[in-house]
Structures are given as structure tokens and as C-alpha cells.
Image (cartoon, rainbow, N blue to C red):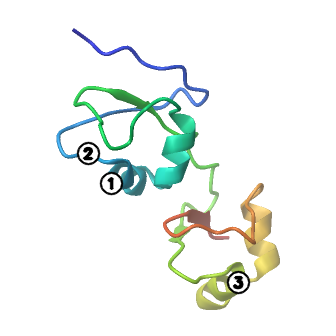
């Protein structure tokens, strides 16, 4: 019997496979385990069932350059700008809605 899909604002789902965890799914889709927990209230992250559908966050906004930088531990927009030869202002311009004071490890940032 097919598992029912939960309500999901983004309309994007992940079908749980053998060995999947919130952490591995989050890494695969470019989000955090905490985000998946928030999007899937009532789901026990320590008892995922094969075939279960999980709600995923909306896809990343369009990126004109098609080039993304993946945030690493301790990185800031300033360090990313220095590393990639751009400015914080340019990064903010191509990443509307990003919180420059709350970057997450594994977060994808569009480069100009």
C-alpha cells in the first residue's frame, strides 16, 4: 500500500529509502536536519519508515551564474566574498532573503 504524502507547502517530497536519516537526506537536498524536523511535525526523526514521504523545503532560488558556494564551518559572507573574489553586497544582491548572520553549514549560496 502506497504511503500518503503529508501536506507540504513546497510540493517537494522525499521518499525514505533504506538507511536514510534526516541528516543524510538534508545533506542530499542542501538543507539541515533541523529544517526537515520543522517541515515534518509529528514525524519521529529516529524512526523513519522505508517508503514514508517527507516534506522538503522549496528549491533554491534561481541563480543566474548557476554557480553555488557551499558554506563550511565558521564561514561568513565576508570570508566567502574574499575567497570567491566578490563583495558581501554582491552576494546579498543575488541571494535575496539570506540571513547573513545565520549561515548554516551545507547551505548553498549563489555566486554572482
- The local secondary structure at tag 1 comes to helix
- The local secondary structure at tag 2 comes to loop
Distance between the alpha carbons at the discs numbered 2 and 3: 37 Å
Q: Is residue 20 left or right of residue 110?
A: left
Quick one: quadrant of the C terminus? bottom right
- The local secondary structure at tag 3 comes to loop
Instruction: Report which residue position mark 1 lands on.
Output: 24
Q: Upstream in the sequence, badge 2 or badge 3?
A: 2
Q: Is residue 85 left or right of residue 40?
A: right
Quarter of the image for residue 52 reads top left
Kindly check if marks 3 and 1 are in contact, taking CB atoms under 8 A apart as contact.
no
Kindly check if marks 1 and 2 are in contact, taking CB atoms under 8 A apart as contact.
yes
Q: For marks 3 and 1, give the one nearer the viewer.
A: 1
Q: For marks 2 and 3, give the one nearer the viewer.
A: 2
Quick one: quadrant of the N terminus? top left
On residue 86, the disc is: 3
34 shown above or below 112: above
On residue 20, the disc is: 2
Distance between the alpha carbons at the discs numbered 1 and 2: 6 Å
23 shown above or below 111: above
Residue that extends furthest to the top in the rendered view of this protein? 1
Amino acid at each position: 500500500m502506497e504511503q500518503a504524502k503529508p501536506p507540504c507547502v513546497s510540493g517537494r517530497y522525499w521518499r525514505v529509502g533504506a538507511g536514510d536519516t534526516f541528516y543524510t537526506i538534508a545533506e542530499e537536498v542542501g538543507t539541515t536536519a533541523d529544517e526537515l524536523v520543522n517541515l515534518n511535525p509529528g514525524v519521529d526523526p529516529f524512526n523513519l519508515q522505508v517508503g514514508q514521504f517527507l516534506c522538503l523545503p522549496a528549491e533554491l532560488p534561481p541563480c543566474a551564474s548557476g554557480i553555488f558556494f557551499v558554506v563550511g564551518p565558521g564561514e561568513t559572507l565576508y570570508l566567502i566574498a574574499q575567497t570567491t573574489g566578490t563583495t558581501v553586497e554582491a552576494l546579498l544582491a543575488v541571494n535575496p532573503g539570506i540571513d547573513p548572520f545565520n549561515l548554516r553549514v551545507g547551505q548553498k549560496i549563489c555566486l554572482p
